[in-house]
Image: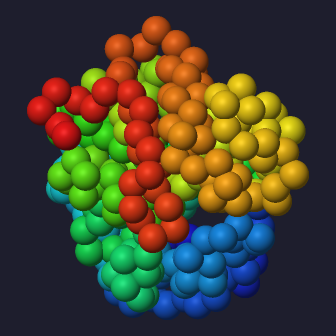
């Protein structure tokens, strides 16, 4: 609006993709001949988002192209691999945010009697450093952060941003023609699996607690083989049918674990406090039993998808204590 002579407002309202409205405070603004700029502070609420509190700036410059184009400013990454929603070479600004910005340009161009030819440069000061704490380097997004979003609303209870990143990782792996990907519950198991199979960084999917989110997407978007890695506790929950492995959303059923152990001819671990304690009492055969049952659950989620799977269980030091399933051909 300021670009074409409109007044600067301290509060702005935008229409979100689903028709809701949201209001933001303008944190900064500036203008000169041919361009105008405004910025807001990102509020991620209770979501564990490393970009919470970042300044997001948008500079709009008149152009003679007759259309809206996007430029990566400071702290905005560039896509370098296929498989993401925008092609390689483009700023990492997803289609929905792009469409939202185009809609605003169209509306204001009509209001002020101007053409829609503008160049929009997004920037996030410090974004290059912050991006190192995200999955962008693994996805092939270099130089900064990505501008995501499908609804315009942060929904921390669903951890939708994390699951969306898992999906994008699978998309990138498929576009790169990878036949083997791996999801791990944490950094220790991820290092063990990657070292075991010599997998590239972009084959490693940051699954965390979201086994269901990874496996269900693979069911619809298959890769030939997936390895699931994790510790005793997380894989025990997966073996018992949990698909969200977070401690606040699933628990180990120790009575059921005790029955499994006794049925396998091992010690009764019904009275233990943790799955790790059960392993320390019953020993490696229990780890093998859990890994096998976890593999059964993985196959159940994958259904008839053309995806084979294996399980790699590690201890807290990263040593492999159990495996189940056949690794891909040519792998140990």
Horizontally, is 16 left or right of 306 in the view?
Answer: right
Asked if one can make out residue 163 in the rendered structure from this viewpoint, the answer is no
- The residue depicted at 84 percent of the width and 45 percent of the height is 270
Residue at the left extreme of this rendering = 330
Residue at 24 percent across and 58 percent down: it is 195
Dividing the picture into quarters, in which one does residue 242 lie? top right
Image coords of residue 70 (percent x, y): 32, 61
Which of the colour schemes (rainbow, by chain, secondary structure, one colour) is used? rainbow
Residue at the image position 43 percent from the left and 76 percent from the top:
133
Q: Which residue corresponds to the image point at 71% horizontal and 26% vertical from the top-left?
A: 263
* 308 in relation to 283, above or below: above
Give the camera-side residue of 127 and 64.
127
Q: Front-most of 286 and 6?
A: 286
263 or 99, which is in the foreground? 263
The reply, left or right, for residue 166 in relation to residue 204 is right
Placement of 276 over or under 205, stated as above or below: below
């Amino acid at each position: 609006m300021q670009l074409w002579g409109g007044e600067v407002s301290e509060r702005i309202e935008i229409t979100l993709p689903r028709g809701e409205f949201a209001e933001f405070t303008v944190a900064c603004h500036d203008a000169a001949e041919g361009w105008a700029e405004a910025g807001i502070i990102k509020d991620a609420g209770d979501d564990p988002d490393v970009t919470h509190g970042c300044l997001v700036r948008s500079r709009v410059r008149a152009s003679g192209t007759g259309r809206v184009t996007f430029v990566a400013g400071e702290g905005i990454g560039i896509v370098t691999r296929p498989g993401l929603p925008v092609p390689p070479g483009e700023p990492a600004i997803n289609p929905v945010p792009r469409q939202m910005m185009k809609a605003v340009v169209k509306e204001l161009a009509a209001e002020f009697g101007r053409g829609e030819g503008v160049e929009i440069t997004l920037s996030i000061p410090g974004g290059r450093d912050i991006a190192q704490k995200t999955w962008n380097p693994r996805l092939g997004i270099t130089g900064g952060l990505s501008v995501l979003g499908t609804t315009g609303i942060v929904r921390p209870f669903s951890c939708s941003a994390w699951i969306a990143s898992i999906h994008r990782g699978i998309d990138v792996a498929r576009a790169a023609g990878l036949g083997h990907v791996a999801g791990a519950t944490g950094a220790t198991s991820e290092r063990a699996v990657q070292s075991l199979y010599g997998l590239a960084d972009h084959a490693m999917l940051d699954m965390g607690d979201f086994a269901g989110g990874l496996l269900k997407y693979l069911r619809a978007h298959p890769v030939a083989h997936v390895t699931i890695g994790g510790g005793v506790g997380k894989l025990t929950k997966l073996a018992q049918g949990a698909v969200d492995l977070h401690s606040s959303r699933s628990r180990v059923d120790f009575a059921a674990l005790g029955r499994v152990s006794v049925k396998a001819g091992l010690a009764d671990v019904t009275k233990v406090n943790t799955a790790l304690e059960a392993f320390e009492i019953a020993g490696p055969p229990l780890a093998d039993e859990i890994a096998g049952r976890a593999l059964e659950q993985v196959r159940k989620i994958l259904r008839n998808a053309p995806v084979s799977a294996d399980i790699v269980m590690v201890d807290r030091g990263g040593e492999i204590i159990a495996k189940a399933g056949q690794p891909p051909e040519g792998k140990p």
